[in-house]
Amino acid sequence: MSDSHYVNDKPFDPKSIEVLTPEQEAIYLAPQRKLIWWKFKKHKLALVSGIFLVLIYAMTIFAEFLAPYSVESRNSDFTLAQPHDVNFFHNGEYVGPFVYGYDKDLDLENMVRIYTPNKEKVIKLNFFCSGDPYMFWGIIAADNHFMCADIENPVYLLGSDRLGRDMLSRIIYGARISLTIGLVGIAISFTLGIIIGGLAGYFGGWVDLIAQRLIEVVQSLPTLPLWLTLVAIMPSNWSQIAVYFAITVILGLIDWTGLARAVRSKLLALREEDYVLAARLMGASTSRIIGLHLVPGFMSHLIASATITIPTMILGETALSFLGLGLRPPTVSWGILLNDAQNIGVVALTPWLIYPVIPVILVILAFNFFGDGLRDAADPYG
Amino acid sequence: MMRAMFFTMSVFTFTIATIVFASAASVIPLYEEQVKAGKLPPMKERLPLNPYKVDFVSVGKLQGKYGGELRLLMGKAKDLGQITVYTYARLVGYSPDYTIESDIAEAFVVGDGRDFTFKLRKGHRWSDGHPLTSEDFRYYWEDMVKNDLLGKKGIPTQMLVDGKGPTFRVIDELTFRYTWNKPNPAFLPALAAPSPLYIYRPAHYMKQFHARYADKTKLDELVTEKNVRNWGALHTRMQRQRRPENPELPTLQAWKNTTPPPSTRFVFERNPYFHRVDPGGNQLPYIDKLIMSVVSKDVIAAKAGTGEADLQARYLQFSDVPYLKRGEKNNNYTTKLWSLGKGSQIALFPNLNANDEVWRKVLRDVRFRRALSLGINRKEINEVIYFGLAYPSANTVMPQSTLYKSDYSQMWARFDKEKANQFLDEVGLDKRDPDGTRLLPDGRRAEITIETAGESAEETDVLELITDHYREIGLKVYIRSSQRDIFRRRAYAGDTLISVFNGLDNAVATAAMSPKELAPTDQAQLQWPKWGQYASTNTKAGEPIDTDGARVQLQLYNKWMLAQDEQERTTIWHNMLSGYADQVFSIGTVNNSRQPVVISNDLRNVPDDGIYAWEPTAYFGIYKPDTFWFDR
């Protein structure tokens, strides 16, 4: 007997042991993007929040179309009117969505206007109709609205303010400034944070030393007095929005330090990894190594801090405008709407003026949930 | 016979009742023990021989009871000065019908409008018991105004006629005289002003801080101790009359501050030597203490609405009324609506000294200003913001003033878009952009920036309404709000086109009051800051007037300054008012709007309907808070 054993001369196919179904194959070989999406989908709350945010940002784009009225449109006969109730049945008959018009009474004893729904005055809600004219994005003249009602017989789904302007429309327009202006600050702080932190972490040595000291100096600046000073020294011929924009930019210039620290420490750890060495030996440039090999490694952290910072910026606008330091009327933002609601009488007599606080809370919550989901999803192997 | 007897009887009982009442109240409970112990003289000795007897009958006041604390809310510690406005004891002051009467002075005589003799009340004392004499007036004039260090700022402007001060002469212990070469009609109104010219100081107290009288080493010690630059600074700090920051400083007001700042709660105690009495001869004030709490001005309405103030109007706005009304039942107060005494609640001031040449020419054209005035829908402003309770009016005197004529308030104050458009076309703004905005003669769009100090929501609301009104006559308005200092500086420098502020401070003027607000006399006048500065600095700064309308106003004002009698002054006032109305130097909206005044239900003698104004009523001043009392 020869000392022989059997050798299969066919090439070995490792997949033959565990045969993957096409479905399994799709999973195992899926690109990272897909994995992230799958993981994200599982986080239901984050998904809902994400959709909500997409919708609300879409709302800021189409504000002119969605708002029943333009920002300035007002009916001085109906100041501080309470929200209309939407009904469907009039005298037992279905007539589609409608509201009852108000009758106004002046209470000269208490100096309040009393609005009572008049069961005779049926104001039907029209959809996709012509209303207040506007310049869409400042270029296209149009007058189409999702819902409209003549300002002579106004429909206030969220009540009206002191001058008889529709709160709903103002909240929609206010979202524009409140939700967008802070993003600029974040963009700046992120760019700076990643670049400076990345350089410090990757190179170490004296680059790191300088970056660290710079971070410490910037971090030790007190922010609130700084804001106050900035508000005071802004050229007075700048428009309110320009001033606020400038403040956000400067805030962004200060806000990057925390992120830079995190990026640096992550990079310090990651640059010792073998794959970085391999990349370097293969002649990859620094920017390629940082951008392509290192940054994706802590994407989840970046996303987490971004989703925390965006709500901070939105709240910052609201808080500053509320205190009268940020934007001022006639600019419309959520903070300004809330500033109008500062008066003690509002809480007692006209609570609908506080409604802008609801979108503020919802957006902040949505950002937090969304960020939570994204952070989990960004690291799909973890 | 029976009837006669009944009559006699009733007179008799009445007399007895009065006597009993008077004698029963002639001891102030707060001082009872001190008087018994001999620490304080009895009331009769504390009063001047001839005290100021407040007229209760004509204003329907009731004789009251002593005691109680009046709680007031203020928005900042600086408001300490408001107390001297409220208490309003002046050398001479305004009576309820806005004529000047003697108050601290027993009598005054004016000769030829240029010679003022005052006589003090015999036995009148400072709050520390030291007699008030001519020496206190001499001290002010010779040791303060004429002193090199203290008088650095020179003679107060109200005491200057043609740049020259008066000669001062003490006649006897209680009589003294100021004499100018020419009439000085501004002198008495300045003494009676809410923030008056104080021409006296408690000399016996102040001398310890004055280098001429004080012991040098002692004074130096004090200067070091208080950490001030020199004795002058020390003197200035210790003598403040308007803001009673120094609890040691003797006063002539009804209440005296006992709390040194900084504090958030200031307690004012009654002045035991106050010079006024009620018809029963009882010394005023009735109320023992004023408690002034300093809180954030945003919560004052909330606090007043929960009954934390006994008398409150400052920092309350018309829009607070529904809230205040709601709290009335549970918190034992009533909200009264007084008339606000401003020429216009909110007025626009076209800057005739604007730097932009094209705009300046346009703003100086009276037709343009008239168009601005005709383009405002005052009825809507009134209804939306003031519940229809105010009067649509130009910025002029109110109907309550004896000088009022409907022409002044209505001449260009109706709403007439057609006429406004016609005027604007005539001025040269007849070309328009496709969106309807007019074009300036040089082709720029007629975009006006209206600047505001951004202090009240009411102002913003009115401006938003005006923006809409002006859009309809082809003017595009931008509103820019800043802080008050920046706002003023920009207007003074000519950077502002149109500014917004409240109208005339004194809208219930009489002919004896100065018509200075109607002529370029002060830099603070937003429609002509540079001309005003030119006049007030004696041509040293600013620019000379170069339009006829404004020049006429100033000439009239100068004539008023030299006028000899009431009739001449009245004529000049009317000429100035009609000139101002015709030229539309400022654009009024509404006046006579309502000021909520929260009054405790226990507080008596506060009028239900008053005029709430800085001048001449000094807010509560001429209603004499020393006669208010608590019925508890």
Image (cartoon, coloured by chain):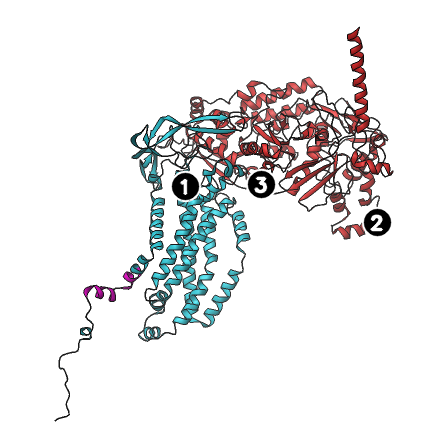
Chain colours: A cyan, B red
Camera-side residue of B540 and B261: B261
- The kind of secondary structure element at disc 1 is helix
Q: Give the residue furthest to the bottom.
A: A1
- The kind of secondary structure element at disc 3 is helix
Instruction: Please determine if labels 2 and 3 lie on a single subunit.
Output: yes
Disc 1, disc 3: CB below 8 Å?
Answer: no
Q: Residues within 10 Å of mark 3 (few under 14, many from 20)?
A: some
Location of residue B155 in the rendering, given as x and y in whole percent from the top left corner: 73, 36
Q: Residues within 10 Å of mark 2 (few under 14, many from 20)?
A: some
The residue at the point 39 percent across, 45 percent down is A176
- The span shown in magenta is A19-36
- The type of residue carrying mark 1 is Ile
Label 2, on which residue? Answer: B216
Label 3, on which residue? Answer: B299
- The type of residue carrying mark 3 is Val
- The kind of secondary structure element at disc 2 is helix
Q: Does residue A134 appear left or right of residue B409 in this picture?
A: left
Is A1 located above or below residue A31 in the figure? Answer: below
- Report the Cα–Cα distance between label 1 and label 3: 26 Å
Location of residue B471 in the rendering, given as x and y in whole percent from the top left corner: 42, 30
Is A23 located above or below residue B167 in the figure? Answer: below
Q: Tell me, yes or no, if residue B116 can be seen here.
A: no
Given the image, what chain letter belongs to the residue carrying mark 3? Answer: B
Camera-side residue of B371 and B287: B287
Earlier residue among tags 2 and 3: 2
Q: Does residue A235 appear left or right of residue B100 in this picture?
A: left
Label 1, on which residue? Answer: A171
Q: Nearer the viewer, mark 2 or mark 3?
A: 3
